Amino acid sequence: MNRTFEEARAMIRNIHWNREEPNKPSHGILLYEYLRRASQFYDFIDQEPNKRLAVFSAADMCGIKLPIEIYAFCDELNDIQNEWLVKSACKSYLEWAYLSGENESVALQFQGLYVPLIKLFGRGGRIRYHHGELTSGRTARSRIISVEMSTVEPEDISEETLDKHDIHGGAATF
């Protein structure tokens, strides 16, 4: 398999799925940045505003069929228990990493699409749907991504900056 895909698989394997820390300040920043990137992707594919789901397969949205079945091929996804939305997001990330590694142009253009979400999981955060909203810890957002999200400034999601927010209790963007 390609290097980008194998690196993505390693990222998923290295997440401690039994550890959940629901309310770190970095989680809000990462979720916000993911929604911003997702909104830009939706703008690119010209998705209708009321169909911009927060968790989606970019490969499916682009109509790209992978030559492998991610759930069958990536046994690291089996480590994610009782978190169907998290598992689905990780599957979408792995699909996108595979396509990036195969030099698929749209995947290369939006290569970092899922990175904030995977970083969120790596820092002990999780996402869920609850009462029609996407939740992460105490934060709740619409499960439909606003068109306006694509116009906001990007967040610095470097490990150093995220660590500073978590240590000093910095305010999240929400």
Image (cartoon, grey):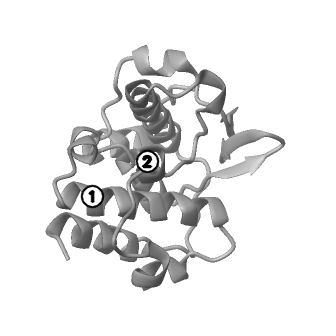
What kind of element bears circle 2? helix
Could you say where residue 140 lies in the image, as x and y percent from the top left? 69, 36
Could you say where residue 52 lies in the image, as x and y percent from the top left? 58, 33
Q: Residues within 10 Å of mark 2 (few under 14, many from 20)?
A: many
Q: Which label sits on residue 58?
A: 2
Could you say where residue 102 lies in the image, as x and y percent from the top left? 18, 60
Could you say where residue 51 lies in the image, as x and y percent from the top left? 63, 32
In the image, taking residue 158 as reference, residue 13 lies left or right, namely right
Query: Which quarter of the rendering shows the C terminus?
Result: top right
Residue appearing at x 36%, y 66% in the figure: 66
In the image, taking residue 87 as reference, residue 91 lies left or right, namely left
Q: What's the residue type where badge 1 is placed?
A: Leu
Residue 138 visible in rendering: no
User: Most extreme residue toward the right, as rendered?
Assistant: 131
Give the mark count.
Answer: 2
Q: Which label sits on residue 120?
A: none
Query: Which quarter of the rendering shows the N terminus?
Result: bottom left
Based on the displayed image, in which of its 4 quarters is residue 132 positioned?
top right
Q: Which label sits on residue 99?
A: 1
| First-in-chain label (1 vs 2) | 2
Name the one closer to the observer, 56 or 85.
56
Q: What's the residue type where badge 2 is placed?
A: Ala
